[in-house]
Image (cartoon, grey):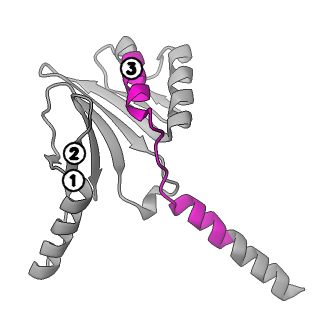
Amino acid sequence: MKKRVIGGVALLLVSSLLVHLWPRQPPDDVLDRMQGILGKLEEMYEGETIFIWPYTAEPDGLDSERVKWIRREMRETGFSRVSLSCSEHGCSSSYFIAKGLDIFRYPMYYRYDSVDILEEIIVDNVEKAIEESIEKAKEENISVLYAFCERTEVEHWFYCENNH
């Protein structure tokens, strides 16, 4: 009996971990959905950066009906958080892909940048750029920090990954 309980607990823990580590693929219409979320964020923007997570939002006092709509879209699209900030140069908005326990994986996100001024490096293929960075770091025996984005089919939208 004790072995069955231990085996059941172990199986439950392993399967739970796999569910959290398994990458979530956004739906095919992810860019359309993000465009809709961006529109709602822009309607609410009043000069302060907006952050929306599943259970909280900043700044306080945001339109609750719009926030509910954004959260519903976030759940359906597989995002863990969204944000919008603007400066005199333009606006930037990030959409972090929910992938379970974030402590085990590096950030994967979509980003809207109205003037294409990204802190990340724009590459043709994020996955290939990461692999090349890791290989180069191994050859030089140094740690690697990366932040890469690739353009999507929609102007001003990027898919990004970084490890910091």
Residue 18 in the image: state x and y as whole percent. 57, 66
Q: Is residue 28 magenta?
A: yes
> Nearest the camera: 107 or 154?
154
Q: Looking at numbered disc 3 in the image, what kind of residue is underneath it?
A: Leu
Left or right: 40, with 85 as reference point: right
Q: CA distance from mark 2 to mark 1?
A: 6 Å
Image quadrant occupied by the C terminus: bottom left
> Closer to the observer: label 3 or label 2?
2
Q: Which mark is residue 109?
A: none
Report the residue at 14% width, 32% height from top.
116
> Closer to the observer: label 3 or label 1?
1
Q: CA distance from mark 3 to mark 1?
A: 29 Å
Residue 36 in the image: state x and y as whole percent. 42, 21
Please say whether residue 54 is visible from this viewpoint: no
Left or right: 157, with 18 as reference point: left
Q: Looking at numbered disc 1 in the image, what kind of residue is underneath it?
A: Asn
Q: Mark 3 or mark 2: which comes first in sequence?
A: 3
Report the residue at 37% width, 31% height from top.
31
Q: Vertical placement of 26 versus 41: above or below?
A: below
Q: Looking at numbered disc 2 in the image, what kind of residue is underneath it?
A: Glu
Residue 110 in the image: state x and y as whole percent. 33, 39
Q: Which residues are magenta?
A: 13-41
> Nearest the camera: 156 or 70?
156
Q: Which residue is mark 3?
A: 41
Q: CB of mark 2 within 8 Å of CB of mark 1? A: yes
**Number of residues whose C-alpha sits closer than 10 Å to that of mark 1, classed few (under 14), some (14–19) or many (20 or more):** some
Q: Mark 2 or mark 1: which comes first in sequence?
A: 1
